[in-house]
Amino acid sequence: MPETPHVDIDYVAKLARIDLSDEEKSKFSGQLESILGYIEKLNELDTDNVEPTAHPHPVENVWQEDLVSSELPVEEALKNAPAQRQNMIVVPKVVE
Amino acid sequence: MSEELYYKSASELSGLLEKGELSSVELTKVVIERTKAVEDRVGAFNSFDEADAISQAEASDGRRAAGEARGALDGIPVGIKDVLAVKGQPLTCSSKMLANFVSPYDATCIQNLKQAGAVLWGRLNMDEYAMGSSTENSATHVTSNPWNLDCVPGGSSGGSAAAVAAGQATVSLGSDTGGSIRQPASHCGVVGLKPTYGRVSRFGLAAFASSLDQVGPFGRSVKDVAMLLQTISGHDERDSTSYKSEVPDYLASLEAFKGKKWTLGLPKEYFESAADSTAMEPVRKAIDFYKSLGCEIKEVSLPHTEYAVATYYIIATAEASSNLARYDGIRYTHRAENFDAKDSVDIYCQSRAEGFGEEVKRRIILGTYVLSSGYYDAYYLKAQKVRTLIRNDFLKAFEEVDALLAPTSPFPAFKKGEKMEDPLSMYLSDIYTISANLAGIPGMSLPCGYSDGMPVGLQILGKPFKEQELLAVGQEFEAAHDFVNQHPDL
Amino acid sequence: MEYEATIGLEVHVQIKCESKIFTRCKAGFGYEPNTLVDPVIMGLPGALPVMNKKALDGIIKAGLALNCTIPDYCKWDRKNYFYPDSPNNYQITQYDKPICDGGFVEIELEGKSRNVMGEHKNIKLTRIHLENDVGKLNHFAEDSLVDYNRAGTSLMEIVSEPDMHSGAEAFAFLTAIRQTMVYCGISDCDMEKGQMRADANISVRPVGQKELGAKIELKNLNSITGVKNGIEYEIKRQTRELKKGNEIKQATWRWNADQGITEPMREKEDAHDYRYFPDPDLMPVRVDDEWRNRIRSEIPELPWDKQRRFMEEYELPYTITSVLVPDRELSEYFETAAKQAPKSAQAIGNYVVNNLLRELGEAGLSLAESKVQPEHLLSLVSVVEKRVITKNVANKDVFPEMFKSGETADEVIERKGLKSDIDSGQVEAWCREAIAENPNPVEDYKSGNEKAINSLKGQVMKKSRGKANPQEADEILRKLLS
Ligand SMILES: [Mg+2]
Ligand SMILES: [Zn+2]
């Protein structure tokens, strides 16, 4: 954990795909740095030999057999679409 | 009686329905009328569909007439937090992002309610995407606390708690990621229970933090909460994290446990930090009550308590930053009117800038940061390890005691706007509830008194998958007090 | 200065399943847009993934067939990036704990000629992991349309070490993987249907230089020959640049099959920050020996082993095996017959590779549709060995009839009266005439020119109007001339 956390707010906002206003940027980076500062208290703990907890009641090999049992009619699948054509979602042309 | 019908318990109403002294349509109409009468003051709902509710009620009465009633909840109006998918109903998460979204499918817990014949009633307000402790982070409006309209109802399930407190629903469903059921229950003077992680299916619950989220019941009595919990609990093939273990008969165990002399623990860290809190007096009285019953009261230690908030905000925001990536302006959400079509990412950046509120943006940014390159080990992995320590604290404590008693919140409901500008202090107010989500254990809040006229909740934390014991402990207190019949005057 | 290329491949192979990898929604190809979707595939609020057991069995089978170790434990991670074909804007994949570790692929390079086996070598694998496929973008003038039918299809990613050095090796690598997958029934690897897709990492360095040159990731290699041509072109291009003294910048390029060139796609500068973390919606997978062994027992004899065995056990020439073995059904058809007449295996091999495949090709039929079954072939082999008919008659008259009617050789011979009615006495008479009438070849033969006997044999065949048995004539001529 960096000693004095500095948040490159532009980089993070780009990663998160959120266009932040300048006010939001300065407000958030201040608040985030104080939260990150608070979070540093975790460094007081030696966790070298501690197993991480992903699921509080871990189980393994949870699966289903390969049988079709789920569907969604195309009109249901697209009824909330902001833009559609020929039963497909319209998006701006993507290079690649 | 009918003017008071909306404050009767689900168990009592279910008896009336069974005896034919009341029809579901009558009951539902009363609840609808009550809702409309107080909604302009309480504002618990994002939306409701009267016609749909009436037709569900008619179907219920039809079943009963045909001798095909489906059990205790058949015909009972159940309010639904606007975070659970109900086929054909709006699902907004109180976000502009989903303002026009109509769910094409049912959550598993909703399917369970439908099979039980419950009347699904309305879409209840919440903090946007369940991120908050006051319901002030809703994109639609701020819900008021029925006990004092200037105060918040708590959150994130503020609408679910307020609706039950105000008689706008007999019982309701909420979700709890860091206290979002227990804290508003405490602030609104009702009973709310967060089940063990994995006890209730998350399928159809719009995810905030997958490893912490649980769906749970609100009611005006422990028994009502038990009835609703019974209906939604159990393993679900469609949720890989739901737990395979049979569900006990909660009502039966409430009877069976009556008068049991429980061994109850007081987490000393909780009481130290809460010493000065105004919410403590009723909690101490409640503890004395259990002593007077002959329960053994032990002080226990949860040494890693002070790390819970930091751990929680790393895990919750990291998971949220990924879970909320699907709200992107492409398939079914709000899409910005204006974006640079030449720039392949601008449609996302603009749609998400417009669709998300401030708190959601703040948490997505924090979560994105802690996962970003180079920081995974330092933040997320570290937090998962501390999570193990926090969980072990509880498991160790439960070797000595059956359940833990604690305050639900450091203070009763605060005034609207009071904490909005200081996220960290808002986060710190979750101190007593957050650990249960990290440890995956069940927790319940029930009314135990007042502080300057505002309700205060007693929190009971229990062993994994021992909800029946929490309910039983809670019922001992409830039975000896009159909080079930205390209602806000609206 | 001499330059050498280093190539690593990332091969994505779809695993044949009825449903998708993380939901029981139907999987398939060629359906109407967005008809193979459900709440999970559309990434709707509240939808949750659940593993597909068959996809796990499939990748473990692939791993064992490609000599990987299957660790006891693997888990799922989210790879976070925004793209319209990815409904959740994260891909569920395996970051640091893949289900298959290491391994290698045995490949065969082209031999000196078509009938000589080429060099075999092992190409090292880094790993094979499982992940979900994305949807499909259809590009138009003004915008793009997204179809999520393919999204969520079970996909394995086979990652090789930088262990190849030419387009030919890459070609052989993909061919070997495809054969193995098809043999094991894991995938049909139809590149036209996107069931197999390859990206290549290509770098060039002066011979003798230790560190690798800057690598170009080459995408859009949509056919096996595309892989070969694209890589060869890119190697030439990089070498040319280096010779000009220009430096190669790490970047992503694309193979343009129409123009037969590679072209830049994007600089590595905007390299993604994928924010991998364990998917909290999925439980880890634990594999034990019981599971490994069950899958291992389902793996058939693999192509290279079968080819080596055919060449040894049945003494088949390489050319025959290289036609029989790549087609599992054909090789099994052959062996059904060969097992019953091992000494005639070569003759059987010839009938299958030459006669049967030609007739099937001309009739446009599949092996399964062939009326000629292994036992029919055996009947043909035996009548030829018993000299009931000549090879010539077998090829020209009998086999085509068998193919049309589905009769045995004997039935065809009976029906068409093809049985050669000449006895050895008659053949010997023709031989004596041939010797009498052709002194020169006789001289040549006696003076040691073995070949000369052929022209005498030719005379005998002419006299018999092709009905005499050439071997028989050969034997009698030698006897008379000795
Ligand atoms: Mg890759
Ligand atoms: Zn991949």
Image (spheres, coloured by chain):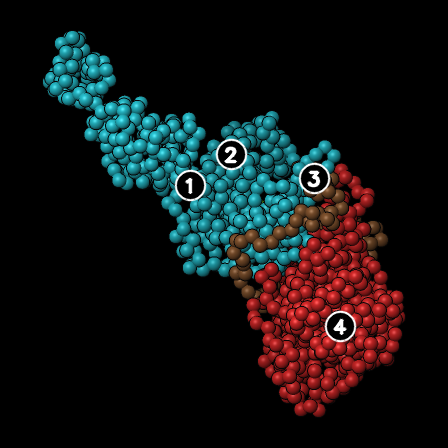
Chain colours: A brown, B red, C cyan
Tell me if I can see residue C213 in this picture. Answer: no
Asked whether the beta carbons under mark 4 and mark 2 sit within 8 Å of each other, the answer is: no
Is label 4 on the same chain as label 2? no
State which quadrant residue C332 falls in: top left
The kind of residue on which mark 1 rests is Glu
Q: Nearer the viewer, mark 4 or mark 2?
A: 4
Asked whether the beta carbons under mark 3 and mark 4 sit within 8 Å of each other, the answer is: no
Is label 3 on the same chain as label 4? no
Disc ID at residue A86: 3
- In this figure, which residue is indicated by the disc labeled 2? C224
Q: Nearer the viewer, mark 1 or mark 4?
A: 4
Along the line of sight, which residue is nearer the eye, B261 or B357?
A: B261
Q: Is residue C295 left or right of residue B413?
A: left
The kind of residue on which mark 2 rests is Ile
- In this figure, which residue is indicated by the disc labeled 1? C106
Q: CA distance from mark 3 to mark 2?
A: 32 Å
Is label 1 on the same chain as label 2? yes
Compared with B147, B123 (above or below) is: above
